[in-house]
């Protein structure tokens, strides 16, 4: 990548922000319809503490859910690779959970799970675990057959093939799944917060967005949205960086 | 050592091997030569016990039925564990048989040294060239001192120079008494250079078309090598007219 290509997305963003600000000012659009970037920054600054606290709350749910999704996805994928019966049992239900929109089941989960924090985490896990499961399962199944033969020729037991060969071979697939799961966990957390927020449970950025909407504090709503977008980008980039570093150590790249 | 009697193997409607009779004796270097898709690899898998024939049988001489580690297998690709160093890759067959790292260290070291890999013990596969990776793969196959070494076109993906060196080294290993070797190839030159016996196979369904006694002490420039090559070529063209 040349320097220009590296700087291009940032330059384009600044240009777009400038054009946006100019349009809002020149056309005299009131800030309760479309606020300009300057108004959004001012609104963020005015409610800095509240918004950052909300962000922290959303991120706590997101990372707890991501952590649990990684473990759940990995364990289920291992079970599916170890036993055909387990595969037959798990696969259809994992797909059912995946295709059911979380918005539709979130009210039930929030009703059933007493602790609001865990209710949010459960919703986010439901959205986020599937890519980990399906990627890891693909990786476990994609081990070169020659290596499996080699293990068998040397009298390897099934668990040795699974843990010494298939599992490390699936690591790049698992990490790719984790990267998708990271942003999905955020989406899941926010969706659940929206549902919980409309029920009066005040937590997270989604609730701030709802609240600002009700009060027609549109600049503050934009500020919360911006934080959300930045958090998503940061999670995606961090996981990408992390998985590249792990794979380099692991010897795959 | 091992004998195939009227062995046939079908995959669906395709007959991969048709009534193969073949005996491999102690300390032979047998080349199985034939076009792609003639069932050479299937034959190796049958010898390794990784696959079973539909008809006929594979029988081992008394007391020579292979246990874990008695058969070494080298594939067309090096198929190393990418996350493990050269030494760990070579240690793998011993590790799978429950031999601990300390105890096997001298064997691993010797196997690496025999393939000229001193100084590369800690290198990961991605840091090695194709030829070096194949050397690690051969060291891995030899570390358990197998009585039978099966090789499935191991040098087909290498460049000519690397191939020549590895062929030379393999002949040396065999002469030192490493193992009985069954070597699958589609190269007439390779078969003539390496094998003490060359078996020519027909295109699908795979049958044994004939056998030529080789001489794997010849140099590549020896006229006798050239005439061996043309003898094999004649037989191959007889079963597979151009």
Image: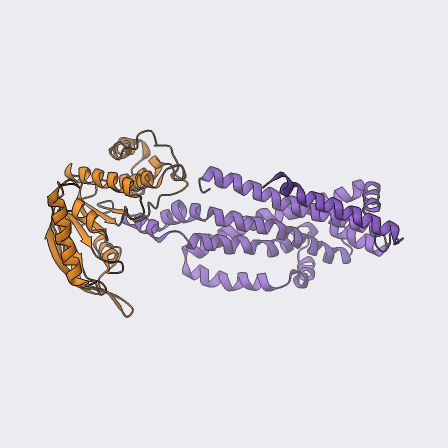
Chain colours: A purple, B orange
Q: Residue B156's x, y, as percent?
A: 29, 48
Question: In the image shown, does A131 or A108 lie closer to the viewer?
Answer: A131
Q: What is the number of callouts on the image?
A: 0
Query: Which residue corresponds to the image point at 43% horizontal and 45% vertical from the top-left?
Result: A168
Q: Most extreme residue toward the top, as rendered?
A: B119
Question: In the image shown, does B226 or B201 lie closer to the viewer?
Answer: B226
Q: Is residue B143 visible?
A: no
Horizontal arrangement in the rendering, residue B45 relative to residue A19 (left or right): left
Horizontal arrangement in the rendering, residue B106 relative to residue A3 (left or right): left
User: Above or below — where is A140 with respect to B139?
Assistant: below
Q: Residue B93's x, y, as percent?
A: 29, 42
Query: Which residue corresponds to the image point at 43% horizontal and 52% vertical from the top-left?
Result: A140
Among the 4 quarters of the image, the one containing residue B8: bottom left
Q: Is residue B71 visible?
A: yes
Q: Residue B92's x, y, as percent?
A: 32, 41
User: Above or below — where is B54 with respect to A185?
Assistant: below
| Quadrant where the image shows the N terminus of chain A | top right
Query: Which residue corresponds to the image point at 43% horizontal and 47% vertical from the top-left?
Result: A169
User: Above or below — where is B213 with respect to B52?
Assistant: above
Q: Residue A42's x, y, as percent?
A: 84, 43
Among the 4 quarters of the image, the one containing residue B128: top left
Horizontal arrangement in the rendering, residue A227 relative to residue B102 (left or right): right
Q: Most extreme residue toward the bottom, as rendered?
A: B13
């Amino acid at each position: 990548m040349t320097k220009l290509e590296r700087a291009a997305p940032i330059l384009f963003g600044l240009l777009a922000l400038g054009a946006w600000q100019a349009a809002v000012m020149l056309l005299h659009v009131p800030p309760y319809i479309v606020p300009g970037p300057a108004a959004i920054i001012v609104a963020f600054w005015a409610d800095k503490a509240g918004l950052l606290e909300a962000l922290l709350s959303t991120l706590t749910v997101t990372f707890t859910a991501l952590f649990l999704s990684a473990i759940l996805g990995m364990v289920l994928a291992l079970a599916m690779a170890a036993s055909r019966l387990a595969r037959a049992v798990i696969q259809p239900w994992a797909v059912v959970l995946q295709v059911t929109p979380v918005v539709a089941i979130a009210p039930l989960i929030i009703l059933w799970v007493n602790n609001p924090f865990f209710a949010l985490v459960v919703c986010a896990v439901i959205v986020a675990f599937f890519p980990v499961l399906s990627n890891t399962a693909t990786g476990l199944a994609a081990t070169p057959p020659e290596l499996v033969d080699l293990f068998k020729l040397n009298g390897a037991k099934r668990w040795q093939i699974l843990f010494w060969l298939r599992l490390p071979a699936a690591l790049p697939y698992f990490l790719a799944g984790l990267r998708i799961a990271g942003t999905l966990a955020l989406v899941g957390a926010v969706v659940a917060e929206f549902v919980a927020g409309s029920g009066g449970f005040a937590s997270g950025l989604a609730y701030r967005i709802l609240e600002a909407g009700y009060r027609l504090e549109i600049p503050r709503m934009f500020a919360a949205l911006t934080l959300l977008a930045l958090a998503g980008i940061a999670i995606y980039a961090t996981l990408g960086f992390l998985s590249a570093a792990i794979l380099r150590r692991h010897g795959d790249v | 050592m091992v004998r195939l009697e009227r062995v046939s193997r079908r995959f669906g409607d395709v007959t991969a091997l048709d009534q193969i009779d073949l005996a491999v004796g102690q300390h032979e270097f047998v080349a199985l030569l034939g076009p792609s898709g003639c069932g050479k690899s299937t034959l190796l898998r049958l010898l390794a016990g990784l696959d079973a024939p539909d008809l006929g049988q594979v029988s081992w001489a008394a007391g020579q039925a292979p246990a874990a580690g008695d058969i070494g297998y080298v594939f067309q690709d090096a198929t190393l564990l990418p996350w493990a160093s050269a030494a760990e890759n070579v240690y793998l067959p011993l590790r799978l048989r429950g031999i601990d790292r300390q105890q096997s260290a001298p064997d691993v070291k010797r196997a690496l040294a025999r393939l000229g890999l001193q100084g590369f013990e800690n290198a990961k596969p991605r840091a090695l060239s194709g030829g070096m990776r194949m050397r690690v793969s051969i060291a891995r196959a030899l570390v358990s001192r197998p009585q039978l070494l099966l090789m499935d076109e191991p040098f087909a993906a290498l460049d000519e120079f690397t191939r020549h060196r590895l062929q030379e080294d393999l002949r040396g290993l065999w002469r030192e008494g490493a193992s009985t070797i069954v070597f699958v190839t589609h190269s007439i030159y390779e078969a003539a250079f390496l094998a003490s016996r060359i078996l020519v196979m027909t295109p699908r369904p795979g049958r044994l078309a004939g056998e030529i006694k080789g001489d794997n002490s010849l140099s590549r420039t020896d006229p006798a090598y050239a005439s061996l090559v043309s003898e094999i070529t004649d037989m191959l063209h007889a079963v597979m007219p151009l």
